[in-house]
Image (spheres, rainbow, N blue to C red):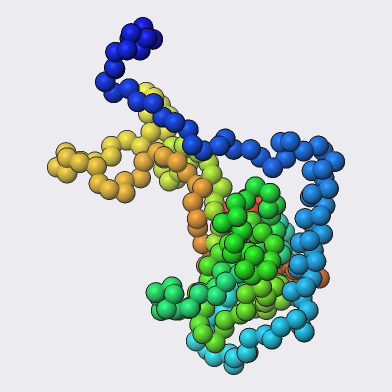
Amino acid sequence: MACALARGYSIPGLGFVVRHVNSTTWWHEHLSEENVQFLKKITAEEYKAQTASKLCPLKDEPWPLNEWKPDSIRVGVVAVKLGMMPIWTKSGKKHAVTLLKVQDCHVLRYISKEESGGKTSKLLVGGKNASPFFKSESAMKIFKEAGVPQKQKVATFNVTDDAIIKPGTPLYAAHFRPGQFVDVTAKTIGKGFQGVMKRWGFKGQPASHGQTKTHRRPGAISTNKAAKVYRGKKMPGKMGNIYRTSFGLKVWRINTKHDIIYVNGSVPGHTNCLVKVCLLVS
């Protein structure tokens, strides 16, 4: 090829691509360790002041409060899953609960029914502050408009017109009450590629009596009459790492000091994952 190019011959199918985009350079590549720590400190102080300014009730006029109705749909929160623990009721009955911490949760944007094209309005809610150094300007736009720090997770909630909240409003664990029932959505723990016994709970085949290398296999996957494998057949494949919702979990306790919600039973996801919590809508 080099000789052909040197002699001036053209080679069909060979094109030359001119690079017009600069290579990616991370923000801390050409900075000293002292400068990196200084920028992180300044950003943390700016985030703290920005969050504190949102708590001032005299800064601007709040949106009008509406009366609650039985068909009202309120906004939820984005929380961090801390883990599980047992609790006991006054009657001495034991319950396993999951601790969900509402950390740095703010309302980001209000979307009307006309904008969303649906039957209800929507509210975007973000939870847990994130580092802004690895985000683009376009990704930071929604947070700058709301006047809040960058968030790790943004969730969408359907709300009625009498339950809308002004963007920038902080949300706490006191948003819920003990005795209420909530739905918790999160991404399940990824298990990788698994067989049918672990993925679907198959019994498996006999361990002896003529069985050879089929102990954990599914067996027949169709019949001679069908002559095909039906869609949705339970077979080996990737397990977990998908969004799942636990419905109707009872709120046993609210810790207002540390903003922790105690919900009944287990919820999807690993420890320290971000979950979406909303009131149960029957």
The residue positioned 57% from the left and 35% from the top of the image is 23
- In the image, 138 versus 68, the foreground residue is 138
- In this rendering, the answer to whether 90 lies above or below 22 is below
- In this rendering, the answer to whether 96 lies above or below 37 is below
Q: Position of residue 142 (x, y in %)?
A: 59, 64
Say if residue 77 shows up in the picture. no
Quarter of the figure with residue 120: bottom left
Say if residue 214 shows up in the picture. yes
The residue positioned 71% from the left and 64% from the top of the image is 104
The residue sitting at the bottom extreme is 67
The residue sitting at the left extreme is 225
Q: Position of residue 88 (x, y in %)?
A: 74, 68
Q: How many marks?
A: 0
Quadrant of the rendering where the N terminus is positioned = top left
The residue positioned 73% from the left and 67% from the top of the image is 260
Q: In the visual, does 11 lie left or right of 71?
A: left
Quarter of the figure with residue 229: top left
Q: Position of residue 127 (x, y in %)?
A: 65, 63
- In the image, 47 versus 265, the foreground residue is 47
Q: Position of residue 264 (x, y in %)?
A: 63, 66
The residue positioned 28% from the left and 37% from the top of the image is 220
